Image (spheres, helix red, strand yellow):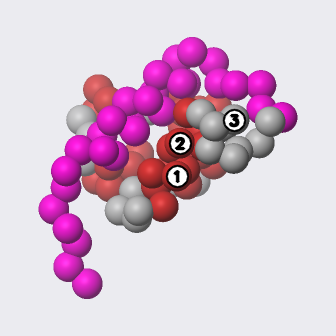
Amino acid sequence: MVSKEVVLQTLKCLPNQYPQILEEKYPHILEKIVQLWNSPDGEAYFADLLHPHYSGGRFDRAGFPEKVWQEILRLNELYRKPRPKSIR
């Protein structure tokens, strides 16, 4: 499981933006978001989370509770904000 400090540093989010419910109920999803944060693959992952039927995702999902969905949506908004490109 990814630590809260790693999430805050990687996502460059404020403590009040921390996805607490996502961490508690779906830690594997939060970990995947952190892994893909600086990758172009993150966009497809967010699309699958937010619109599973439209992006070729699974049809067996029941959907997320409203508060989890809101956290994912906020993280998607943060992901879409321009960031400095990493130097490799």
Please, what is the three-letter code of the amino acid marked with disc 2?
Answer: Ala
Dot 1 or dot 3: first in sequence order is: 1
Q: Which residue is mark 3?
A: 53
Q: Residue furthest right?
A: 60
Residue 6, image quadrant:
bottom left
Q: Which amino acid is tagged 1?
A: Ala
**Residue at the disc numbered 2:** 47
Task: Give the CA separation, mark 3 to mark 2.
Answer: 10 Å
Residue bearing the label numbered 1: 44
Q: Is residue 82 left or right of residue 75?
A: left
Q: Quadrant of the N terminus?
A: bottom right
- Please tell me whether mark 1 sits on a helix, a strand or a loop: helix
For the point 77% across and 25% down, the residue is 62
Type of the residue with mark 3: His
Circle 2 residues within 10 Å: few <14, some 14–19, many ≥20 = some
**Left or right placement of residue 73 versus residue 38 in this view:** right
Residue at 53%, 42% in the rendered image: 47
Q: Camera-side residue: 12 or 82?
A: 82
Image-based side of 8 in relation to 85, left or right: right
Who's the residue at 40% across and 64% down the image?
A: 39
Front residue of this view, candidates 9 and 49: 49
Q: Which residues are magenta?
A: 60-88
Residue 31 vertical position relative to residue 35 in the rendered view, above or below:
above
Coordinates of residue 84 in the picture (x, y in percent): 16, 62
Quarter of the figure that contains the C terminus:
bottom left
